Amino acid sequence: MSTPARPPLPEKAADTSAEHPWPVRLLSMKIGEYVEKMSVLWVEGQVVQLTRRPGARTAYLTLRDPDVDMSLSCSVHVNALDAMPGPLTEGARVVLQAKPSFWTQRGSLVLDARQIRPVGVGELLARLEYLKRHLAQEGLFDRDRKKPLPFLPRRIGLVCGRASAAEKDVVENARRRWPSAVFEIRQVAVQGTAAVTEVTAALAELDAHPEVDVVVIARGGGGVEDLLPFSNETLLRAVAAAVTPVVSAIGHDVDTPLLDLVADHRASTPTDAAKAIVPDADAERRGLDAARARGHRALGGRLHHERRRLTELGSRPVLADKGAFVRGQREVVDALVARAHHRVEAGLHRQRDRVDHLGVQARTLSPQSTLDRGYAVVQRVGGAVVTSPEEVEADELLRVRVARGDFGTRVVGSST
């Protein structure tokens, strides 16, 4: 019984599917063919690992990107290494000519190096100068974007090498100035291939710390190649983006990595950084003592001045006899009281005369006064006053009011 024929494999990767996949060997061969078409190229990087066994004709190294965590494996003939002007060491910046190749058995990409050239100091400095101009145009060095340092930070972030002299200088000098200074220390690589990655990560961690008010990045001096991580663009942009103020304390006074220009404060040495991040307790105490003394002198002078003014006021004639002013004012008060009494009495006399005059008028105009002159008032029984003879009837009883009493009378005769 014959076995059914298998369908042909797809020619292109886009034609593959779950039902018609490529076997691993075919994919590996396809990748190898594609890589084989690439031409010889020049690439720059930093040597991370270098393996050269005695008697072997091929050496192996890892070429790492100095800015990000990416690397490629390289193989190089020992003759290319021997042709270099000096021994190749780990951490060196190099430019190499290589042909990419793909190892189908391992499924890995390898650079077959033909030539290796070290990157000279002059070239590195030229690149740094270009980066410096580029960042300056972006405004990363502008003074107005730099943040002021706190007067007394709650906690000081410190990024430094492991068991380094820079850490000791910063911590000891800061605590000598301010004994209660508290540090949050991150020990990282400050030289070599991992320096940029570790310093940037430590800076981000301290910048996010809620109690860290300032971050110091410190390391001792070194050559141009040793300080290259502190002129790396990735690190510089991380420092510029940090919310917490950053102090650069790299190398000695003559060393000028680009970090000095981006940081919020540049310290010439790690010791100088300690002076910048905390105040001097003795100087502050002396300042307080001096301010207190000035305050005492100012207060004493003011009291002396006021006391002298009181003495001068007390020596004036008006105050020499303390009772004179009171006596003078008493005379004024007595005069005012007498004047008030006189005015009140005069007013009372006037009102009394007016009352008497009104009483006379009232008596003159009153009915009783009329009766006293001999007149009488005749009233009917109901109390109505009789003003005409026609108002009464014959034999009607009337009441007659005179000055000293009244009496009754009857009408006689007719009113007509």
Image: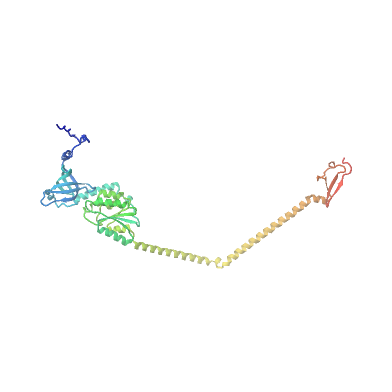
Q: Residue furthest front?
A: 1
Where's residue 242, x and y in %?
31, 50
Where's residue 102, x and y in %?
16, 42
Q: Residue furthest right?
A: 413
Displayed quadrant of residue 384:
top right
- 218 and 370: which is toward the camera: 218
Residue 271 visible here:
no
The residue sitting at 30% across, 58% down in the picture is: 274
Where's residue 94, x and y in %?
18, 49
Displayed quadrant of residue 36:
top left
Residue 135 visible here:
yes
The residue sitting at 75% across, 55% down in the picture is: 356
- 154 and 340: which is toward the camera: 154
Image vertical order of residue 231 relative to residue 413, above or below = below
Where is the N terminus found, in terms of image quarters?
A: top left
Apparent side of residue 279 relative to residue 382 in the rendered image (left or right): left
Where's residue 33, x and y in %?
16, 39
Apparent side of residue 199 relative to residue 395 in the rendered image (left or right): left
The residue sitting at 62% across, 62% down in the picture is: 333
Q: Residue furthest left?
A: 55
Image vertical order of residue 355 relative to residue 33, above or below = below
